[in-house]
Image (cartoon, rainbow, N blue to C red):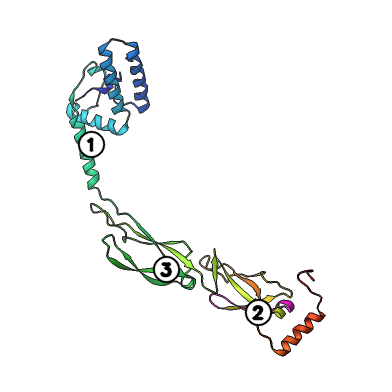
Amino acid sequence: MVFKNYYKILDLETSHVSIDEIKQAYRQAAKKYHPDLNMGDNLAEERIKDINEAYKILSVPASKRKYDRVWNSKFLKGKKAFTGKAEKGVIFQMFLGNLEDINKKEESIKKKNPVKGENIETEINVNLYDAFYGLDKQISLKTVEGQAKTFTVKIPKGIRNGEKIRLIGQGKPGENGGKNGDLLIKINIIDNHKFKLEGVDIYTDLFLTPWEAALGTRASVETIDDETRVYIPQGIQSGEKIRIPNKGYQSGKDTRGDLVAEVKIAVPKQLTQEEKEIYIKLSEISEFNPRTNKK
């Protein structure tokens, strides 16, 4: 198989043409030598084959560059791939193997270039207290060879739920001297029986006695790092929420979300005789009935 002067075949006078100019030249040449317009003309049939072959190579920037390099190295000693008028009507031929050799050489170079290894992703669970205060946590993972490897992961104070920690160079090994990939660890913050994290706010339950809810009071509320007192208005209902500013999860360097305390009115399961009598008396004198009115 031979390699021809594709620029000449497409009636182009220089190799310094854009892909759009090559496409336009191809359409004109293909129309001129179309079999339907040249029936019985064997030369036209050969010509249209050359036109298609030239367009296939020159319309792709990568193959055009390779074609021009072969041309320069074999014929023009560093001059332009095709000068036009001085070479008009001349067809150069060479074995297609030259172009294939360049392809193989470039592929070989790419294979020798350093390639960074792939990243590895995993995830671990961290309880809310540890995430709030930060800690060093050890995890054990299997390497690509199937061996167990232990990592010490420094979990910073106030890390966000779903945030990833990157351990540089602990991923899959690179190729051809390339750097290792990284290990990405996604942090899942787990709630406990007292506190629940939503965004940067922490939710908790605030249990009140019936008389505290009815009369109002000041109650102590446990936070994740201390204790605070809040005002309970009289007549508060179960399910109502009290928001305590700046007592939630870390939201910035020196700022925190809120602590949201949900009121739950707790009724004693066992009563003393005196308590029982008071409740009986209350039921006799009170007109309040939550099923019929909101008094």
In magenta stretch: residue 193: no
> Which amino acid, mark 2?
Ala
Identify the mark nearer the N-term, 3 or 2: 3
Q: Nearer the viewer, residue 13 or 281?
A: 281
Residue 282 location (% of width, % of height): 78, 82
Q: Is residue 33 positioned above or below 98 on the image? A: above
Q: Secondary structure at mark 3?
A: strand
Badge 2 is on which residue?
219
Say if residue 78 shows up in the picture: no
Q: Quadrant of the C terminus?
A: bottom right
The magenta segment: 213-226
Q: Residue at x 34, y 11 (%)?
A: 37
The residue that disc 3 covers is 155
Question: Image check: 188 left or right of 208?
Answer: left
User: Residue 103 got which mark?
Assistant: 1
| Label 3 crowd bin: few (<14), some (14–19), many (20+), radius 10 Å | some
Assign a secondary structure to mark 1.
helix
Identity of the residue furthest to the bottom in this view: 273
Q: Position of residue 116 (x, y in %)?
A: 29, 53
The answer to whether residue 171 is left or right of residue 156 is: left
Q: Residues within 10 Å of mark 2 (few under 14, many from 20)?
A: some
Residues under numbered marks 2 and 1 in contact, where contact means CB atoms less than 8 Å apart = no
Residue 182 on image: x %, y %: 34, 58
Q: Nearer the viewer, residue 74 or 278?
A: 278
Question: Which one is earlier in the sequence, the residue at label 2 or at label 1?
Answer: 1
**Distance Cα–Cα, label 2 vs label 1:** 79 Å
- Work out whether residue 69 or residue 42 is closer to the camera in this orientation and state it: 42
C-alpha span from label 3 to label 1: 49 Å
